[in-house]
Every structure is written in structure tokens, then in C-alpha cells.
Image (cartoon, rainbow, N blue to C red):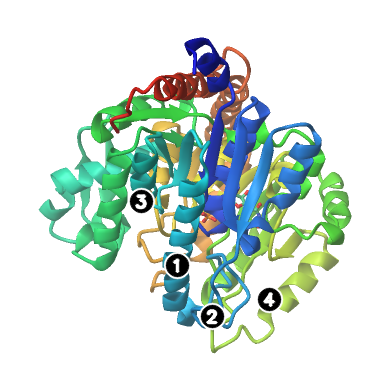
Amino acid sequence: MAIQSHEAEAKNLKVIFIPFSATSHIIPLVEMARLFAMHGVDSTIVTTAGNAGIFQKSIDHDFNRGRPIKTHVLEFPAKQVNLSVVTETFNTDTPLTEAAKFQEGFVMLQSLIENYLLGELEVDCIVSDLCHPWTVEVASKLGIPRIVFSPASIFSRCAELLFEKHRAHNEVESDYDKFTIVGFPHKFEMSRSQLPDWMKKPSMYGMIIKALNDSARRSYGAIFNSFSDFEGAYEEHYKNAFGTKCWGIGPVSLWANQDVSDKEERGEAKVEEGNSDLLKWLHSKKENSVIYVSFGSLNKFPPSQLIEIAHALEASSHNFIWVVRKNINEKEGDEGFMEEFEKRMKENNKGYLIWGWAPQMLILENKAIGGIVTHCGWSTIMESIKVGLPMVSWPLFADQFFNEKIIIDVLRIGVSVGAKEWRNWNEFGSEVVKREEIEKAIALVMENGKESEEMRSRSKALSEDAKKAILVGGSSHANLMQLIHELKSLKHQRLNGVLLGQ
Ligand code: UDP
């Protein structure tokens, strides 16, 4: 083919996106796929029918808007692995007893995806969740770049690597002694109890993380739901630590979901049930008077913790929206406590409980919301920053204790509830945060004191930076354009017979 026609061909970039089967991994990667399609890239998301249900409406909308995007649906091998549950997604409802079968199903799914990719003659790039390390081999077989996506902060990805190397946490005596993290642009203190188990002792999970990190190092680059004014220093750190390129292209939710319908239908929303009661309730509240309380898509508290939160919210002088997920595996119930609590809150119009999935984007951007109590899930942090909300940080698992450091120590836009124990996402552990601590932190964030005013104004300034980042001339916009341009040149080189060394 003549060089000129290779140039024309390279303009038609085809990228395949492979999300991991967990709601909070799927949402931001699909939003990234939608951003690529928004900028003319032929984008295909490969997943199972059950997972596609989480986002398909947004893809249909984008397709009808004339964007080149589609989902390629594969059948999850539930029958072959004898899985009795109907879900294909890791979330709060995934029964732990079925975990091994899920795992088996995922391994079988891997070969289905691989066959699809190897059969797709025209794919130019794979954007893969970090949890699919094998995609680096497939990309290499195809001679195309693999870009790795992690739904975490850039900071936490760098911190994991730094801890592996320096092991400063081994130099303190007790699990609760503080040690300083060295080697970063900012100074942080943590305790061993706040670190993931796999960092503290050798485990199977630690070996998996090592494999994921190795595959990240062998990738062409990494993309994050972040932006330079926020995590620019860590973008540079990542490049050195992992030896690959790194692009922050966030906040992706703000960029991809510009219509109300996008926000309403996001994630596991049951659109047919509507949000009119919730919105009516919010509209009846004064500006900045409501605190939003949510612990993401993976957490379920037992009654002992729910009761402490309920007492704190009732005692607080502020209104609240609380997204509640009760631990259905709990043998002992709360003896009707939560139902009574909800009834009281409804009667005195103080609080609104959402059992299950909340339309978080719609809620956060409502003027009545003045702050958030968050488990420091990365997407939630990005969504709160985007609307300039100060935060009460309450990390639980995964990268959340690292994310808290950015909120509290670097940006100073939040107050910590004082959680000390890292735990697995599906276990509760022994720590119960007391009502007094929760109430105190909420008051500090929501009241009109000097500290709160300063936090709020720093949050608002960061929100302005986030909005600018996605506009023409902004850092995330420039990063996405540069990445697309680079992928086109790589395609052009490949068509001219230049091999890619990843
Ligand atoms: N989310 C939502 N409604 C819910 C729970 C979660 O819209 O009731 C969305 C939230 O907006 C975010 C994602 O799900 O985009 C949760 O991701 P995050 O990283 O904050 O936490 P995780 O679920 O991984 O703990």
C-alpha cells in the first residue's frame, strides 16, 4: 500500500476497551471509551451481557449521537463453571461462596476475549483494565500498544511500588506507630495498620499484584481518571517508577456525561423508578445544607456500624442523604433499628435514605449538597472534586487509605474520621468508628467556621481547575489529544512495517 494511503488509514483508529468485571472498574473505563469515541476514534467495549447492562444505555445514546462506539458482548461461561447466581459482576451482592467459580469463569472468559482480539484484524490498540495482565501478551502478538487503566489514583499506584522497594513500614514496632513515606514530592505519614494485607506479608494476592505491576511496566503507557493540576507531580513520578508513559484524562465523568439523561442512567440505576422524589426533597433544602454519605459500590456495613452512623446523622445539625447497604449475610439483624430510624428521619424531614444504587452524579451537583462522607473511592473523590465539595474521609480498603492522604495532607479539602484499619473489601474487621467521631468530622466540614470556609474555598478552586482541564487548552484535553495522535502515528508506522517494542 502506498505511504499516502497508510496515512489516510491511520486516521481511522480502532481501539478495543476491556473492562474488569466490577462496577467501579467498569464505569470509568467505559467513560474513557466514550471520550475516545467523542473524538472520532472507533471504540469497542468487550464484555459480557451482565456487565454490559451496567452501561449499555449510555453507549446507545452516544451511538445515536453519531459517535463510533459499540459493545461486543460475550457470554459469561456461568453454566460451564456451575455458577448458580445470575450476576457476572463483582459487587456487594456477589456471594463469597461463589468466588472460586467466578474465578474459573473469568479464566474461561479470558480465552474468549483473546480469540476475539486475535480474530479482529483491524485493532490498533488495547486499553485494558489493570486486572487483565494477559492483555499485554495479546497486544504484543498483534504488534499493537496496550494501554493500562487502573481505577485508582496515580499516587496510590506509585505508593504501592515505593513500599515494595523501601518497606519503611517494617521499621516501626507496632502496627499503629507512624512512619514517613519518603521519595515522593510530598511528605506523608501512615501506620502499618492502614496498609493492604498483601503489602505486609507474603500472600497469593501479593503475587497477583506483582504480576499486574509487571504487566503495567510492559505496557506502552497508562491512563488515569485524574488531571495534572491535581496529580501532575505523580504523573511524572509514575513515568519514572513504571518506565512507561502516563496520561491523566479526567475527570472522565464530567467530560463524558454532559446531559441529565447520562447522569440519571449511569451505573446500576433503575431508570424506570425515577428520581423525582429525591430531587424534590433536595430542592426543598437550602444551599450547602445537606451532607451526602456513601461508601461506594463494594462496601456493606454490619448493623453495629450502621447504628453508629445513624446516631451521628441524627445528632448532627445538618440534613443528609445516606446510601445504605446492609450486610445481608449478617446473622444478627438490627432489630428493626434502621427501619425505625428511616421512619423518624422521614417524619421530621431530616434525612433521605437510599437503599441500593444512588444517582450519585445528579446528587453531588445539586446546590443543596454541602459536603460528602466518603470511603475515598477514587471515582467518588474525582466526582466530589469536580463539584467542589469538602469531604469527610473514611477509608476502608483497596487504595483508599492512600487516597485519604491526598485529600487531607496535600489538598487540605477534608477532615478524617480517623479510620485506622485497612480491611478486605468483603470483610468488616473489628474497627467500629464511633458516632462522636463521625459527628465531629461532619460538623467540621459543614459548619461555618474559618477551617470549613478555607476547605470549601480550596475545594471550589480545585473544581474550577477540573472544569478547565477537560476544555480545549486544558491538561486532560491536551493529554487525550496527544494520546490519540500518538496512537495514529504508531498505526502509521505499523502499516509501514515498523515493529513496536513494548
Ligand atoms: N456509584 C453510584 N451510586 C452508588 C454507588 C456508587 O453512582 O450508589 C458510582 C460512583 O459515582 C462512582 C462509582 O460508582 O463512579 C464508585 O466508585 P469508587 O471508586 O468511588 O468506589 P468503589 O465502588 O470502587 O468502592
Which residue is denoted by mark 1 in the rendering? 108
Secondary structure at numbered mark 1: helix
Q: Considering the numbered disc 4 on the image, is that residue within a helix, a strand or a loop? A: helix
Mark 4 residue type: Met
Q: Earlier in the sequence, mark 1 or mark 2?
A: 2
Q: Nearer the viewer, mark 4 or mark 2?
A: 2
Circle 4 residues within 10 Å: few <14, some 14–19, many ≥20: some
Q: Amino acid at mark 3?
A: Pro
Read off the residue under disc 2: 83
Q: Is residue 427 above or below residue 312?
A: below
Q: CA distance from mark 4 to mark 2?
A: 33 Å
| Residue at 38 percent of width and 74 percent of height | 430
Instruction: Report how far apart the C-alphas of labels 1 and 4 lie in the structure.
Output: 42 Å
371 to the left or right of 184 = right
Q: Earlier in the sequence, mark 3 or mark 4?
A: 3
The disc, 3 or 2, on the residue closer to the chain's N-terminal end is 2
